[in-house]
Image: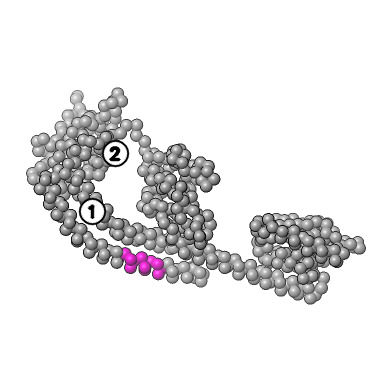
Amino acid sequence: MADINQSSVKEFLAYVRVSSKDQSRGTSLEEQKAYVERYAHSKGYRIAKFYGETESASKTGRQIFDDMIKELKKKSYSGIIFHKVDRSARNPRDQALLYELMLQGYELHFSDGGLSTTEPQGRNMIYMLWGMASAYSENLKAEINKGILGRLKQGRIPSYAPLGYNKAQDCKSVFDPKRAPLIKRLFQEYGSGRYSVQEMVKRARAFGLTNRGGKSLDKNKIHDILRETFHYGLITHKRGQFQGDHEPLISKGLFDKVQGFLQRRGFRRKYTYQYIFSGGILKCPLCKVGLKSMTAKGKWKYYYCRNKICEVKAIGEDEVSDHMLARLREIEFTDAEVVNFKKALRTFKIETETSKTEQIQALTLEKKNIEARLESMFQKYMDQKIDDETYAKMNKGMLDKKIEVQEKITAIERADSRKFEQIEKLGKLLKSPSAAYLKADSLNKRRLILSMVENFELKSNELCVTWRKPFDLVAKRQKSIKCGDAGNRTRVQPKQA
């Protein structure tokens, strides 16, 4: 048994507590202290030291509480005076610790209600209050978890919204009008493949993207933003992944593209010179490898094969460009073909409307089936029929599928106008592709080529074009135009001995 102070005046430690910092800013701690002091005075006790803490009693490991227990055992104090029973402990570990102190002869007093462990009736009341406090804490924790899960299931994040969004009423996330466009630009620029994450730090600073405090973003923060699934509509939380009800800032396709670049660390594409036919478009006839580009004297651009055994002389970009211009003129529409193209487009619009309705109906049914499976799986998780790992894995797969299906529905709903606009642009382009090519600079010439041509290939001292769809069909409509016909080839001379 502890060596209790036998003097005429008993000395006690006193403990007061509030659960949050907001409460500590008011008078709650001071009011508790006043109650304890009045109680001690009425009993003739002396308070040697006060311990005040802003911490939940349902948590174990309260630092100030533990320091007080150590102090109590170190010196000859009679015990501890608390304000209320629920201010002392709400978890079984701390309740057991106080119970052990009582068995060792230390007194526990509670100023509110005048309860004390020195009386049998007081002890019984304290035990019941401890039990109810512990049960309340467990129930509150379960309700909080249920509430958080409920929010997540609603598609709303209970904590701070990621950069690019602001929190609105009822935990809803809405676009931050200042930063949302800049976050989107961050994804688009990194997704272009031209920049590393470190370079995006400079890019972000250049176009004014900062954190909420107005400070520039470092490499780690840029990386975190580019990894955040919230931006394409999926909430990733420690309790799993959930479909968000906020408006996505980017598409899942762009997000996946960015993740691909992030996995290829150090990936960087930077051009000193812009080449129209680089990147494997122009291939060697012997080894089938894309020709390498080079610039002589900072002015003349050439393409050559890296394989020394291939007897292919370097060919100038201007020469290849002239050949491309000739091939573009081959597939140009005549005036009569332009008229027929417009008639075909009107017919296509009518036929597409029926197909669109059928596709949306099928995808909507698929989406409802996924939602039903998500609901069933969530209920099993709440009933503890499946573990956290299984739930997280299955939930992510179905949510990703749901997002993909919704993106398909949205794409189909928007597809008509976009598809028709693209076809109309195609018709205009085919009316005079050579004119568009002549007006463009090197970068836009390359973009035009990439949109129309699969690749060039050197064959028997001449260059042949493989068209992309639908330009291949347009090219096939030409009568008797082959790669070897006069006027449609560029000869490539073998290397001189």
User: What number is the disc on residue 420?
Assistant: 1
Name the quarter where the N terminus is drawn: bottom right
Please name the amino acid that badge 1 sits on: Phe
- Decide if residue 486 is in sight here: yes
Majority SS type along the magenta span: helix
In percent of width and height, residue 371 lies at: 40, 67
In percent of width and height, residue 193 lies at: 37, 42
Q: Which range is magenta? A: 362-373
Please name the amino acid that badge 2 sits on: Gly
Q: Residue at x 49, y 43 (%)?
A: 210
Mark 1 surroundings within 10 Å by alpha-carbon count, few (fewer than 14), some (14 through 19), many (20 or more): some
* Apparent side of residue 293 relative to residue 266 in the rendered image (left or right): left
Residue 7 on the magenta segment: no
Look at the numbered disc 2 and give the secondary structure of its residue: loop
Foreground mark, 2 or 1, reads 1
Compared to residue 280, the image places residue 418 above or below, namely below
User: What number is the disc on residue 6?
Assistant: none
The residue carrying mark 2 is: 279
* Apparent side of residue 107 relative to residue 200 in the rendered image (left or right): right
Name the quarter where the C terminus is drawn: top left
- Asked if the residue under mark 1 is in contact with the one under mark 2, i.e. CB atoms within 8 Å, the reply is no
